Amino acid sequence: MCVTRIILEDLSMKRDNTLHIVCRLVSSTILVVALVACFPQKAQTDTPPASSNPASNLRIALETDKTTYSVGDEIHFEVVLSNVGEVPFRILMDNVFIGSRMECMDAQGKRCVYEGGYNSWSPKVNIYTGRTYLLKPRDKMNVKMDALIYDDYTLIFSNLFDRKGNSGHQEFKKRINLPPDFPDKYLSAGRIIPLHKPGAYRFAYLYETAESDKHWRTFAGARTPEEASVDALLIGKVVSNTIELRINKSEQKLRGAH
């Protein structure tokens, strides 16, 4: 920048210089306007790009085998996760604490809070009890979960894997007053939801992840490096459709019945 100091000796010279400066300013302004008009301006829009909300590309459908159940019945939930977008992404799924993402509300709209399973345990620090799954455009992933309606209308979610044949199961059942034929797959860390009474209940499946989920050090359910990858991990919250199930009134008691 060049700065010129001008010493004006009389009023006449001041007026002449003022006029000269104003003329130069007007000319410069016209030149700038002309230059701007020569270059096309970027269109302004209030619509964000589709990729700004990648969670909108995940669709979740929740289904069951029927709509009415009684104590002693199993509810067979099926969750279908679909990529309806144009780019692939990974989703994070827990393989141990089954039922943690199941939202349950009673007829009055009160949320039913889940508890730890029969085989409760705490994972080590920075270890996620599951893995990631890749969903390409138009891919679908089916997740099946079973839940047993037990005494006092308690809903018990099963383990994802069959655990039959474990010699320690019978001793464990005896200690907690479960009958010998209590299904082994429910001796797991699957969540327990005390419903307390019969009636209508609404269920929905919730997928929710945060940026902090990218920082797990180990994924316990991963068998390959790809299954532990957090590249393109879907971050956000997506809720499935809501289904209504009815639990019938029953005097049946399964615990200690044998």
Image: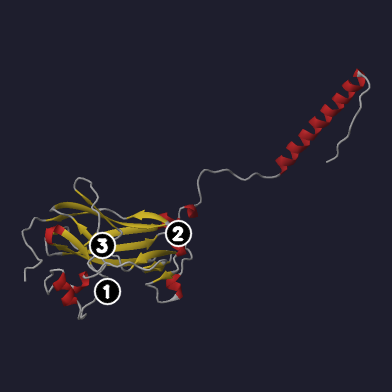
Element under disc 2: helix
| Residue 133 numbered mark, or none | none
Q: Quadrant of residue 204?
A: bottom left
Task: Say which amino acid is labelled 2.
Answer: Ser
Query: How far is disc 2 from disc 1 in space, using C-alphas?
Result: 28 Å
Residue 130 placed where, x, y %? Answer: 36, 69
Q: In this view, does 36 lie to the left or right of 178?
A: right
Q: Residues within 10 Å of mark 3 (few under 14, many from 20)?
A: some
* Residue in the image at 34% along x and 62% along y: 81
Give amino acid for label 1. Phe
Colour setup of the view? secondary structure
Q: Is residue 50 left or right of residue 154?
A: right
Helix, strand or loop at disc 3?
loop
Relative to 250, residue 18 above or below = above
Q: Which amino acid does label 3 sit on?
A: Gly
Q: Residue 161 carries which label?
A: 1
Circle 3 residue: 116
Q: At 29% across and 68% down in the image, what residue appears?
A: 121
Image location (x, y in percent) of residue 224:
43, 76
Q: Viewer-nearest of labels 2 and 3?
A: 3
